[in-house]
Image (cartoon, coloured by chain):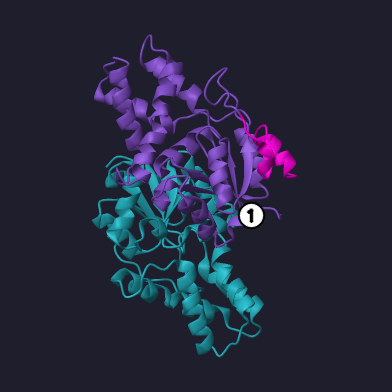
Chain colours: A purple, B cyan
Amino acid sequence: MSAPKVLAFDVFGTVVDWHGSISREAESLIPGIDGDTFASAWRAGYKPAMADVRSGKLGWTKIDDLHRLILDRILVDFGIDLSEEKRRHLNRAWHRLDAWPDTVAGMTRLKSRFMLTTLSNGNLGLLANMAKNAGLPWDLLLSAEVFRHYKPDPETYLGVAEIFDIQPSEVMLVAAHEDDLDAAKACGLQTAFVERPLEYGLGKAAAKGDLTRFTYASTDLNDLARQMGV
Amino acid sequence: MSAPKVLAFDVFGTVVDWHGSISREAESLIPGIDGDTFASAWRAGYKPAMADVRSGKLGWTKIDDLHRLILDRILVDFGIDLSEEKRRHLNRAWHRLDAWPDTVAGMTRLKSRFMLTTLSNGNLGLLANMAKNAGLPWDLLLSAEVFRHYKPDPETYLGVAEIFDIQPSEVMLVAAHEDDLDAAKACGLQTAFVERPLEYGLGKAAAKGDLTRFTYASTDLNDLARQMGV
């Protein structure tokens, strides 16, 4: 298979550490809270909320608004009362997620050879604020918001190829999540798995399937760059 | 008026020199052609083509495809026969436009304080290839392709504010074209005029109206950065 032209990155978990960042922000804002449990609960609402949009049960709703719906619900579950101002501030923590230690260096290497775009369910404003805050050197930001479809809908993976007027096989999805990569592969994209053992917090690494089905399996973005010869 | 948060840039003419770049590419591909006249003719088809999309006469068509429609027509007018491969190559010249000499330095200064996005009628793939080729340090690429509306439709200017969840007055359009700036101003955006006397070629500077109606009037992007205190 020839080298891809465009690398499309999953963002939450693959490029940035949502669990650590949200834990820290929650603990700094809400005295006595267990940040680890809170971050996990918030993220657990994410896929069901998107599924409601994907099924049509909910009209098009961007991630900022889905995050806020889930936040309001888990605050009740946790028995926490927060002002509107603090809720807004906390909801924007998703715009301020920290990159993994290898992210900027690995991206910079890959950018010298390939076109780097996000392919994230996060909305464009969130992705732009995150990139500016964390210094992520994207060539382009693509989002579910552009395609009006959330991953793993095929419109998102195929949409990247359409944007660049290239074949799906000339695009490679880079992600820490096997279900995302499997959906991309079914659309004809190349795939690169990136191991992120701390994505869900310490001691909660996800079980892994057979990674040989992906074009690359890497331990971080520097390792991926090395394997791709840059 | 308080400082804007987001600077949204017109691209063709404001950030890059389409006339010089297209002239040079045409002259290098087609022996004996008058690049200046050819570039002007190609660009002259641009607004009418977009007007057909804006009016609904033509369904949504991205700029790459509009450029190709116009190219095929002017090649007939110029009596030039080009192979399909050369037509494709020439059409992609719009992805390879050179920046004005002050562009990268001025953008880099402005980027240290503001969020910088394109607000261009060019499609995303074109803008991403152009940015990579010319080293343009955008934070985000926004295009008519995202809004499915061409400038000067209000959906484009207001769309930038919606993407960032801010007020229209917190966005400033940066452009070399008064009609674009007037349309943005009517939507409540701040406005910065950038003088580009060579946009249409030597000795063809557009007549200027009263520039005091804009928030800033600048001679180039370094001058705009200086006026904005960065």
Residue B79 lies, with reference to residue B212, above or below; the image says below
> Residue under circle 1?
A5
Q: Is residue A36 above or below residue A52?
A: above
The local crowd at label 1, few if under 14, some if 14 to 19, many if 20 or more residues have their Cα within 10 Å, is some
Q: Is residue B107 visible?
A: yes
Please identify the quarter of the rendering in which residue B60 is found.
bottom left
Is B187 left, or right, of A24 in this rendering?
left
At label 1, the amino acid type is Lys
- Quarter of image, res A92: top left
Q: Is residue A224 magenta?
A: yes
Q: Residue furthest front?
A: A210
Image coordinates for residue A229, horizontal then vertical, percent: 75, 45
The residue at the far bottom in this view is B79
Could one spot residue A9 in this view of the protein? Answer: no
Report the span colored magenta.
Answer: A208-230
Circle 1 sits in a helix, a strand or a loop, which is it?
loop
Q: Nearer the viewer, residue A93 or A61?
A: A61
Give above or below for B14 relative to A134: below
Residue B202 percent location from the top left of the image? 51, 73
